[in-house]
Image (cartoon, rainbow, N blue to C red):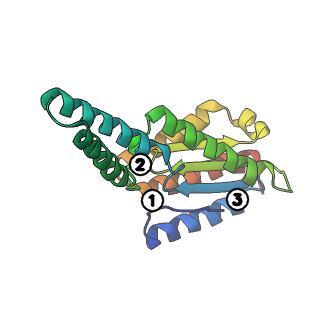
Amino acid sequence: MVRRFGRMDAAGRSRIKEAMTTAEARTKARFVLTVLPQSDRYTLYPVIWAALAALVTGGVLSWFLPLFSLRDGFAVQVAAFLLLSLLFEWRPLRPLLAPPAVRRHHASQFAHREFAARILAHPERAGGLLLFISEAERYVELLADAKTHAAVGEVEWNRIVGQFVARMRAGAPVEAVIDAVNACAEVLERHHPN
């Protein structure tokens, strides 16, 4: 089951859906692919960076123009804060304002919530695997139920993720997703055959 595809074109989405349909038919385990354009809105960071920049602007003004009036300095700081807040609200820029550790943490939390909702809470509970990809955070995670994870081992999951990352770096996002889906399907078929 595919949740979202982000900015991929229609042909790429179609190819991925086809790969997922084929993969799901190979195993009795639940297999979910979630591809998100972004894991969080990061609404706090534009305000923080705009406020910091406005404070620095006021400091620079007072240092280089000591005769600048306090009222005019305050007006410049308010204007800088408002303009930068609006600029930093630009959606592609927001994730870049958050520290890398925060971006990874938000993506990981989202992946675990998806896993709990789509795999663990499923009524059949026959086991399953979530392949989670968040584009803005450049984050990928494979989450499997405890039985599948123990049977497969960390080495196999790391190999799949490593191949996915290498394919993404080569500039082939659709092929990277399809290859990862096929590799996950092989693992699931081995441990949960249909």
Residue at left 22%, top 43%? 72
Q: In this view, does 14 lie above or below 133?
A: below
Quadrant occupied by the N terminus? bottom right
**Amino acid type at image mark 1:** Val
Q: Judging from the image, what secondary structure is the residue with disc 3 in?
A: loop
Residue mark closest to the camera, 2 vs 3 = 2
> Residue 26: which disc?
3
**Amino acid type at image mark 2:** Arg
Image x and y of residue 78, in percent: 32, 46
Does residue 188 appear to the left or right of 126 in the view shown?
left
Question: What residue would you read off at disc 1?
Answer: 174
Residue mark closest to the camera, 1 vs 3 = 1
Question: What residue would you read off at disc 2?
Answer: 94
Disc with the residue nearer the chain's start (2 vs 3) = 3
Q: Are marks 2 and 3 in contact (CB under 8 Å)?
A: no
In the image, 107 versus 146, the foreground residue is 107
Image x and y of residue 81, in percent: 34, 46
How many angstroms separate mark 1 from mark 3 (CA)?
21 Å
Q: Judging from the image, what secondary structure is the residue with disc 2 in?
A: helix
Q: In which quarter of the image is residue 156?
A: top right
Residue at left 78%, top 57%? 194
**Amino acid type at image mark 3:** Arg
Image x and y of residue 32, in percent: 66, 56
